[in-house]
Image (spheres, rainbow, N blue to C red):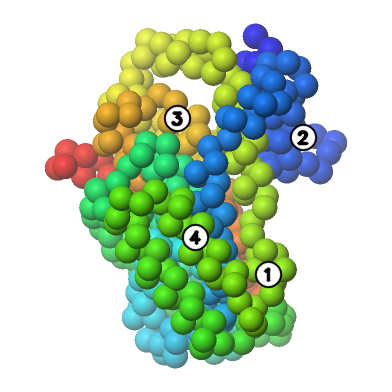
Amino acid sequence: MLAITIFCLAYFGIALGKIPGLVVDRVGIALLGAICMVISGVISPGSAVQSIDLPTILLLYSLMIISAQLRLGGFYTWIALRIVPHYNRPRIFLMVTMLVSALLSAILANDIVCFAFTPILALSLLEEGLNPLPFLIGLAVSSNIGSAATIIGNPQNMLIGQTGRLDFAEFLFWCGPPSVIALFVSYLIILWIYRNEFNVRHDKKHVVQAQHKQPFNKWQTLKGIFAVLILTALFFSSIPREFSAIGIAGLLLCSRKMETRDIMGLIDWHLITLFCALFIIIHGVTQGNYLGIMMDHLSGMGMDLKSLSVLTGVSAILSNLFSNVPATMLLINFLDPLQHAQWYTLAVSSTFSGNLFLLGSIANLIVVEQAGNCGVKITFRQHAAVGIPVTVSSLLILLAWLLVI
């Protein structure tokens, strides 16, 4: 019972997002849960270390290094500045922004895309006196949807792909179509909601200066792009993904111009810590038959996760309750390794669900924070006005895809 108590307290704290009276966040709560699993004797220190899925951590870490290379090379800034001139045709501008965001998020970290694009878009639109809300919300929405299409699009997909030993091409062919359709429908939804507000003029007196733009370095950017192309090709081969990724990342660290310290400074150590802590917590609770009992209880309530529609609904609820990664890490314990459709469904549904509310996705929070630094306030209600219909339509598209596939 000690293991299930620690598990429940940790996941309740993750859902709450804090511990009353303390300033600890979700990552800190997960780490405390992992520590309790060890010091209480539920699992040994050695068992805790062995429970961490090293291939998943290596893949996540390597892709962060590649994203850091592109970011330090000014690639994201350069792309954003190529998009900005289309602002005088707002509907085309929104479409281009969402397409580029979705595409880059499918092959790189969606939070990095949002971090780099948001300040440039916000300041450029404000400078022209245009309404930045539809474009910034569109950026967040499309980055989440686009990242659902590939194994490397976001952290939970990496976990699903590695744990389920899924083929990169099959994952893309299964998850890509609903992602493309959902992106198009989301574009139409945003067009409809903001149909009379694209050209609403905004007062520029509250605009503040954003962070310094990373200067564009052609050689460093080409290195990063070349690394992405080679890595993508290797992902279609039989070479283990983590080997390919860490090898390419190692080559990028061999630089005469870009310091290792600068690249390592852009690694999201908080996210890596969260993954490690959750691996330990889940391993602790699996020492008993607690997850099996939970599964039997859900089946008794008519919620058999073998049903892809039920899995979609449960994933959507838990992803917004705990956030995507903890929800995914819990649900993969109930999936059949031989039924790949279950793994694909979890990947798409957990990612699509991140658009529902602001707290559902880290990308959402990054857009809101960066926009705020530029003098643009995006409220919970403003995001939900788009996020709710986008998420509902996206999940309906997924359910329709399940009937077709």
Task: Inspect the image, locate mark 2, and give the three-letter code of the amino acid beneath it.
Answer: Ile
Query: Disc 2 versus disc 3: distance between alpha carbons?
Result: 24 Å
Task: Inspect the image, locate mark 4, and give the three-letter code of the amino acid beneath it.
Answer: Gly
Label 3: few (<14), some (14–19) or many (≥20) C-alpha neighbours in 10 Å:
some
Name the N-terminal-most of marks 2 and 3. Answer: 2
Element at label 2: loop
In the rendering, at what x and y percent does residue 187 appear? 34, 66
Element at label 3: helix
Q: Which residue is mark 4?
A: 247
The image quarter containing residue 274 is top right
What is the quadrant of the C terminus in the image? top left
Name the N-terminal-most of marks 4 and 2. Answer: 2
> In front: 383, or 365?
365
Task: Inspect the image, locate mark 1, and give the three-letter code of the amino acid beneath it.
Answer: Thr
Q: Which residue is mark 1?
A: 260
In the rendering, at what x and y percent does residue 265 appear? 70, 65
Q: How many marks?
A: 4
Name the N-terminal-most of marks 4 and 3. Answer: 4
Element at label 4: helix
In this rendering, does residue 171 appear at all? no
* Of marks 1 and 2, the one in the foreground: 1
Label 4: few (<14), some (14–19) or many (≥20) C-alpha neighbours in 10 Å:
few
Task: Inspect the image, locate mark 3, and give the three-letter code of the amino acid beneath it.
Answer: Leu
Name the N-terminal-most of marks 1 and 3. Answer: 1
In this rendering, does residue 338 appear at all? yes
> Is 335 above or below relative to 378?
above
